[in-house]
Image: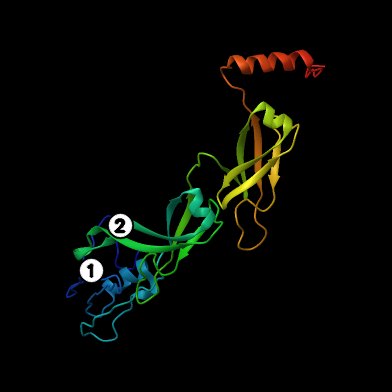
Amino acid sequence: QLGRHWQQGDPFQGAPGTEYAYNFGSGSTDRQEAYFWSSGDGHFSDFFETLFGDRFHKTPTESQDRQSFSIKRQGDDHEAILRIPLEEAFRGGTKSITLQSVSPGSRNIASPQEKHYEVKIPPGILPGQKIRLSGQGGQGIGGEPPGDLYLKIEIDPHPHFRLEGRDLHTELPVTPWEAALGKSIDFPLLSGPVTLKVPAGTQSGQKLRLRGKGMPNPKGSPGDLYVEVQIKLPKKLTPKEKALFEKLNAVSKFNPRS
């Protein structure tokens, strides 16, 4: 039922002597209003009261009284992607970013806007984690507070390190004689250079674990670093190198296929 003065198939008309008009908003997001005038006999009010509920009421007298209502709503939360290099995720710091948004302009016509932020990145942040910028989301309505802006972290691929959880993985190329005899090698990490000891007899594909050298953890223990040893042979041997390998072949009893 759409009110006692509505009939199926007839266009809507106000009762005799009734004027009606409406106006939603004036270009401001703080307050939205709807106005109507009635002669007091209930025709116009009944129709809109059926559609909109208690926000519309009959006028108490036959004079044309203005009725209004306010809409209040907290601003929406927004989300954006923030891509950073692995070094920045490891060390943390402050990053200047610019985001584009669309806001209502004059006459409620949407217009693009740029906003600049100084974002504090905590050390050891991981992909998928979010940084919250309080009050930087959608605007509230009717005096309500704005929403928040969440920056979801994505980390760019690194040429040398691979991130799995808080653990870092990398590879270390060594020569056959370094793997056989052992070697202390200076190795650059995200936290700075370290001296990595390759034990004698290390096999290709073997992993060396450095505890606590992975991603920092503000709320607990840091991750570990796993270094996979890769034994590399020279593509072309000098005559002297070839002679040494031939001598080794003659004296060695090692057979990896036995």
Coordinates of residue 147 in the picture (x, y in percent)? 42, 67
Amino acid type, label 2: Gln
For label 1, the crowd category at 10 Å Cα-Cα, with few meaning under 14, some 14 to 19 and many 20 or more, is some
Residue at coordinates 39% horizontally, 66% vertically from top-left? 136
Coordinates of residue 142 in the picture (x, y in percent)? 34, 75
The residue indicated by pointer 1 is 27
Amino acid type, label 1: Gly
CB atoms of marks 2 and 1 within 8 Å: no
Q: Nearer the viewer, residue 149 or 87?
A: 87
The Cα–Cα distance between marks 2 and 1, rounded to whole angstroms, is 36 Å
Q: Nearer the viewer, residue 165 or 40?
A: 165
Q: Is residue 3 above or below residue 224?
A: below
Coordinates of residue 80 in the picture (x, y in percent)? 42, 55
Q: Quadrant of the C terminus?
A: top right
Residue at coordinates 24% horizontally, 81% vertically from top-left? 66
> Circle 2 sits in a helix, a strand or a loop, which is it?
loop
Is 74 situated left or right of 42 in this image? Answer: right
The residue indicated by pointer 2 is 8
For label 2, the crowd category at 10 Å Cα-Cα, with few meaning under 14, some 14 to 19 and many 20 or more, is few
Q: Is residue 57 above or below residue 146?
A: below
Nearer-N-terminus badge (2/1): 2
